[in-house]
Amino acid sequence: MKYATIIIVLISVLLSANSCTTKTSEEDKNEQTIYPLVNLETVTRQNFKHEIVVQGNIETDKDVLLTAEMGGLLTEILVKEGQHINKGQVIATIDASILSSNVAELESQLEYAQYMLDKQEELNERGVGSEFDLKTAKNQVNGLKSKMNSLNTQKGKASIRAPFSGIVDNVFARKGQMANAQSPLIRLVNNKSVDIIATLSEKHIANIKVGTPIKVSFPNYMDTSINLTVTNVGNYIEPVNRTFRIMSAINNNSFLIPNMLAEVSIVDFQRKDAIVISSKSILKDQDNMDYVFVAKKSGKNYVVEKVNVIILNKFHGKSLIKEDNAINSMDLIVIEGARGIAVGDTVRSK
């Protein structure tokens, strides 16, 4: 009996130990369950804006190719590339020797015609001259004076002058060449006042007005951007690509040159104190509806719920959503790892 009692006690102890071991293993297994790892983001109310970014171009109305108004031999080129010249300064001359000879000849004829007119007026005062002869003399003087003015005007065109102050960018002609209206002589540029020109789609015309703020950056000046306003909105829609032009003027310019590229950013939509979430958190279901996973705290982990959203606008990875109390400020939404989970899943946060 003594040995039997001892054996029964030992069996009871072993069974009890085995039961405790089994329970501990099951608890450890539950504690070691690996839940999907996601990245959560807190929803906040913030200002939202949407921008149009288009390519622009620098232009100026003081970028001209100067040509001769009359043909002839170039006798002098009086400027060099890079030289600053003033408005009205002579930059080149054309041989006008034939015109000078014609002027001298005409002066002689005019002198004689004026003499004849003076005599006819004297005779007319004495009452012995005829009115016909007097009018003929006057007509001849007036005709010669008109020809003289015309020749002097042509002679003046032999001196090519700068139409505005600026920098000689390029000299195409050389002394001794023949000048004509089809061949440019000099490129003259003044960049003190330039315009930024951009074209926008017709759908934006209702949102763009004179005075609309714009931000302009330049690919060739990586660290440079300037804030401007629209100074002119086009009054014509280009039928080929359905676009219109906008312009912004820059005065006292010191670094921009014509035909330089620019990037024009225009805010066409903005809303203050709105619900804005990360665009990468938004998924689509089988019904093509947009939704996000909202994470609710559950112990050390989270349980996810599906919430449909309506997107009002997107820009730079942010989405403005319609406020319907489905998502509120300070809610947690899944922004990474959402494609591997389902409604009701337990997840853990990074």
Image: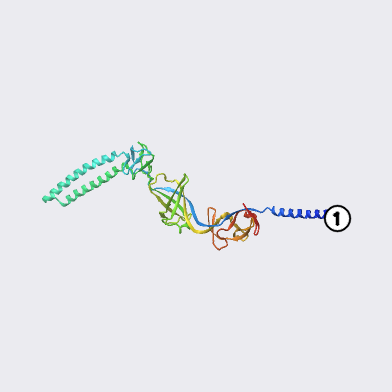
204 or 173: nearer the eye? 204
Taking the image as shown, residue 11 lies to the left or right of residue 250, namely right
Q: Position of residue 22 (x, y in %)?
A: 76, 54
Residue ID at (19%, 43%): 111
Taking the image as shown, residue 314 lies to the left or right of residue 66, namely right
Specify the farthest residue to the front. 2
Residue ID at (43%, 47%): 58
344 or 91: nearer the eye? 344
Q: Secondary structure at mark 1?
A: helix
Q: Amino acid at mark 1?
A: Thr
Taking the image as shown, residue 277 lies to the left or right of residue 160, namely right
Taking the image as shown, residue 129 lies to the left or right of residue 278, namely left
Residue ID at (13%, 48%): 123
Q: Position of residue 193 (x, y in %)?
A: 38, 48
Q: What color scheme is it?
A: rainbow
Whether residue 211 is situated above or below residue 97 in the rendered picture? below
Q: What is the crowding at mark 1: few (fewer than 14 residues within 10 Å), some, or many (at least 20)? A: few
The quarter of the picture where the N terminus appears is: bottom right
Specify the farthest residue to the bottom. 324
Tell me which corner region of the image, top left, top right, bottom left or bottom right, holds residue 158: top left
Tell me which corner region of the image, top left, top right, bottom left or bottom right, holds residue 284: bottom right
The residue wearing badge 1 is 5
Q: Position of residue 332 (x, y in %)?
A: 59, 57
Residue ID at (46%, 53%): 199
87 or 223: nearer the eye? 223
Specify the farthest residue to the left. 126
